[in-house]
Amino acid sequence: MGKRPTIIDVARLAGVSKSTAARALTDSSDVNEATRDKVREAARQAGYERNHLAVGMRSGRSGLFGLVIPDITNPFWAEVARGAQDIVGENGASLLVFSSDWDHDREASHLRALRQARVEGAIVNPVSDNVDDFGRFGLPFVLIGSSAERFPDTPSIGSDIAQAVRLGLDHLNSLGHGAPALILGPRSRLARARFLRTVHEHCLERDVDPAVLLTEDSDYTFEGGHAAMQRLMARRPVGHLAVFCANDLIALGALLAAREAGRECPRDVSILGFDGVPAGAFSWPALTTIEKPARELGRRAALALFDEIAGRPQAGRTYLPCRLIERGSLADLGAQTPLRVAGAVRS
Amino acid sequence: MGKRPTIIDVARLAGVSKSTAARALTDSSDVNEATRDKVREAARQAGYERNHLAVGMRSGRSGLFGLVIPDITNPFWAEVARGAQDIVGENGASLLVFSSDWDHDREASHLRALRQARVEGAIVNPVSDNVDDFGRFGLPFVLIGSSAERFPDTPSIGSDIAQAVRLGLDHLNSLGHGAPALILGPRSRLARARFLRTVHEHCLERDVDPAVLLTEDSDYTFEGGHAAMQRLMARRPVGHLAVFCANDLIALGALLAAREAGRECPRDVSILGFDGVPAGAFSWPALTTIEKPARELGRRAALALFDEIAGRPQAGRTYLPCRLIERGSLADLGAQTPLRVAGAVRS
DNA sequence: GGCACTTCCGGTAACGTTCCCGGAAATCGC
DNA sequence: GCGATTTCCGGGAACGTTACCGGAAGTGCC
């Protein structure tokens, strides 16, 4: 339980000055091979481990990085965290992880903690304008997630929602579905607007009137999806109903609502999710979905951060492509006239 | 992009010495109210934020804590992380989070990083004997999870597997099931032994011969559970089959296997999980399971760590009780003679 | 053998903070 | 109004590390 050995102890043990010990323990070339070995052996013997607090103090580089996400418990963000963790770790640094719960004050407090810990940089999913303060301190940071779009001037990484929506729509079309019904997120969310806009564009490109689109609002939860699907089915009681959900939780809720209503998936309804959460693989039927590259998002954010610190300025925003995961929740309607609104009564 | 203001800048701005500024900014009483306000105002104006690196250096308290878990991507461990994060945050400190991937070398490297960062303490799910080294450095730490049982001398927190198993068994009994079939984890795992032992005890207490127990080995994965359930059904092709699975992923795999075999749950088979993963709530039928108090585990581990640091020595091992979550995967066989082996052919 | 040059090493300062100590001023007791 | 006490503040050192500077040997060359 004695104090931890310092470089001075090592130097004494090796019979050299602390300067020489420091040189030997770093990669400095100004040191004799023999003395380097002697110092290394002394360090090993003393159980010496470099004090990063002191290093950070002297060099200004703490070896610490920060990550502020809404909730580490959310599988998407956990993947992001893992990706960032891996890259940061590969560079010999450590990651401080915080959960903001989408709360302004919590975020502010976490950002302050990060600054006080003298992190070398941070990855943040912004929930407010706190990040502006952050930049003002001259701290390098990279934004992540769809909410980062509000800050076009700072480097950020996100999944390519437009590409993802097109991917889903095209896949639905190829299976013989027309423009699907939509269960969207809350009107306040940026991602919702982008989602909807892309669907509209996709419709127009195919001469489908977007006004014919069937949409319901939800709140990104299982229960919300469940309720929205019930409303949807009430509006389209007959015919095959294809639904494109704004996330997987909604889709899972919709799946339950359909089954409760006696509408079997994928026979009577087709449900397409968006996210790629693990739970989607275990549902019945397993959920066909569009997977956001969560871990890669975290990796790329960390990589961008290192680039920025190294003086390689980053582009405004990078979009990473999403991937379709075909499982069992979509019906193959065969070669059938597409471009019709799903569930529309054919006269 | 200028340098960050130091306490000396604040002192100069307030027209006092840095000693006085330091006193004013901490909770020291040896300072006049007026000058304290003056310093506080100067600090605010300068945008001063205490440098925790320097504080840690001087005081030996870095304000940093470590968490080493197998995988932050695993929902159980994410919950643990969240619990620890919350408690650490409430105490004004920050948490360094690492994923070991159950790998010896990665764990060793993460523990070294923690020591070099001069964390004040760590919470570790041990995958090897690396933690022994850790203790030797005099660093306070708390173990977490079932693998911590190998270290009876160091404080650790885990879920009460024996209580959980009894809870499941009793519940099954109350629903008219006899001793259920078991899908267990790998033979190398400690948790498996404890699980099996408790089932045996439970049987003996009720004059059931444990030899009659139907068991299959698995590997804690969805695919493993799927395969094990197929073997189980081949051994008991008729009658209601109740299965107690060692974790939820296994249970979800078993659910799929049953459905594929045309055995409907909960009509023909009853499946009980163990863990409380989110995916269990979204399956069909939703999985009845025994929930480990993951977040509370993380909270209690952090609390125990603070206690230990504060000089309040911790007990060897603490077991936290698990909770039954009733959903839809268990049949109610009614008041029927219990204590029979589920699925056994009645002659 | 003298000079320039390289190689290697030790001393010192600095990073930003807090703690200890001593001293000046103010207050108190009589 | 004078010593004793309290209140408040400044100076200096220390935490562990690395960067810089200067110097002492050793080497090569003519």
Image (tube, coloured by chain):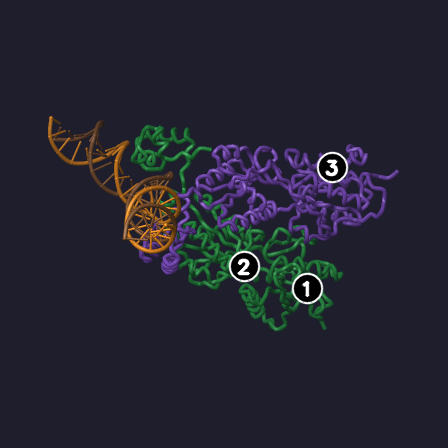
Chain colours: A green, B purple, C orange, D brown
Which chain letter matches label 3?
B
The disc placed on residue B199 is 3
Measured as percent of width and height from the top left, residue D5 is found at 37, 47
- Given the image, on which type of amino acid does mark 1 rest? Ala
The disc placed on residue A213 is none
Pointer 1 and pointer 3 on the same chain? no
Measured as percent of width and height from the top left, residue B183 is found at 71, 39
Measured as percent of width and height from the top left, residue A313 is found at 38, 56
Q: Nearer the viewer, mark 1 or mark 2?
A: 2
Q: Nearer the viewer, mark 1 or mark 3?
A: 3
Label 1 Cα crowd, 10 Å radius (few <14 / some 14-19 / many 20+) = some
- Image point 69% across, 70% down: which residue? A344
The one of B260 and B174 positioned closer to us in this rendering: B174
Which chain letter matches label 1?
A
Is A164 rendered above or below residue B334? below
Kind of element beneath mark 3: helix
Q: Which residue is mark 2?
A: A102
The disc placed on residue A227 is 1
The CA span between labels 1 and 3 is 41 Å
- Given the image, on which type of amino acid does mark 3 rest? Val
Label 3 Cα crowd, 10 Å radius (few <14 / some 14-19 / many 20+) = many
The one of A20 and B300 positioned closer to us in this rendering: B300
